């Protein structure tokens, strides 16, 4: 079972990292389009649609990845002070009551939405000669499926936490900021450094 959970985690991590390259592609594409529009006087009518679809694909396909890394925004003003078992109980209840009904509805509606688009070979109507958007709409149910699988993983982790009293370990991924290297570059106040060490120790205790 643990191998299956880790496999789902790793697949969703790989998907998230793959679509993360869209950030670079979008940056280069927008830069080129601005240059083409203002320097060359040759804007592309399909550029706006392409940007929207790339951003939408990135946003949707990063959902399961973000969930696997516990990166979604939550109102955790009180949640962070709760013991792991209470956190797991709350998470499990919310997954059952809200997450799964919502994601299943997304998969179902998204499939019908995408299927209709494929049948009519739908193109964008934002511009006169809009690009095809049915491949983009096919991402909607696909994103829902990845979220659904990751949701099952999170439920199992919640149950494990309820049994053991601590959250199971997960595969590590890249950090957004290398804190240690950042500290080497800037002067850190000794009191703040000591406080940081205490917080890190507490976090390790919560996850051990």
Image: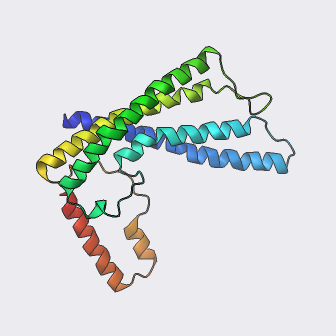
At horizontal 69% and vertical 24% (from top left) the residue drawn is 123
Whether residue 86 is situated above or below residue 106 in the rendered picture? below
* Quadrant occupied by the N terminus: top left
Coloring scheme used: rainbow
Residue 10 visible in image: no
Report which quarter residue 121 is drawn in: top right
At horizontal 43% and vertical 71% (from top left) the residue drawn is 182
Front residue of 150/12: it is 150
Report which quarter residue 42 is drawn in: top right
Front residue of 184/51: it is 51
Point out residue 180 in the picture as x, y percentages from the top left corner. Answer: 37, 69
Whether residue 153 is situated above or below residue 122 in the rendered picture? below
At horizontal 33% and vertical 84% (from top left) the residue drawn is 191
* Numbered label tally: 0
Residue situated furthest bottom in the rendering? 190
Residue situated furthest right in the rendering? 41
Whether residue 178 is situated above or below residue 123 in the rendered picture? below
Point out residue 87 in the picture as x, y percentages from the top left corner. Answer: 24, 54
Q: Does 148 sit left or right of 51 as displayed?
A: left
Residue situated furthest top in the rendering? 119
Q: Does 4 sit left or right of 104 as displayed?
A: left
């Amino acid at each position: 079972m643990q191998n299956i959970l880790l496999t789902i985690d790793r697949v969703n991590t790989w998907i998230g990292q793959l679509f993360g390259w869209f950030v670079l592609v979008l940056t280069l594409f927008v830069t080129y389009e601005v240059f083409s529009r203002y320097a060359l006087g040759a804007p592309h009518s399909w550029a706006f649609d392409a940007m929207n679809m790339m951003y939408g694909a990135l946003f949707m396909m990063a959902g399961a990845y973000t969930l696997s890394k516990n990166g979604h925004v939550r109102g955790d003003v009180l949640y962070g002070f709760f013991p792991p078992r209470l956190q797991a109980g709350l998470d499990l209840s919310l997954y059952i009551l809200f997450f799964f009904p919502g994601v299943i509805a997304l998969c179902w509606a998204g499939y019908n939405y995408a299927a209709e688009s494929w049948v009519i070979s739908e193109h964008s109507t934002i511009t006169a000669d809009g690009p095809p958007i049915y491949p983009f709409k096919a991402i909607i149910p696909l994103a829902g499926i990845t979220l659904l699988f990751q949701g099952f993983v999170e439920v199992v982790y919640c149950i494990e936490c309820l049994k053991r009293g601590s959250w199971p370990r997960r595969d590590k991924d890249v950090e957004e900021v290398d804190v240690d290297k950042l500290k080497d570059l800037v002067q850190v106040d000794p009191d703040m450094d000591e406080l940081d060490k205490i917080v890190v120790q507490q976090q390790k205790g919560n996850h051990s």
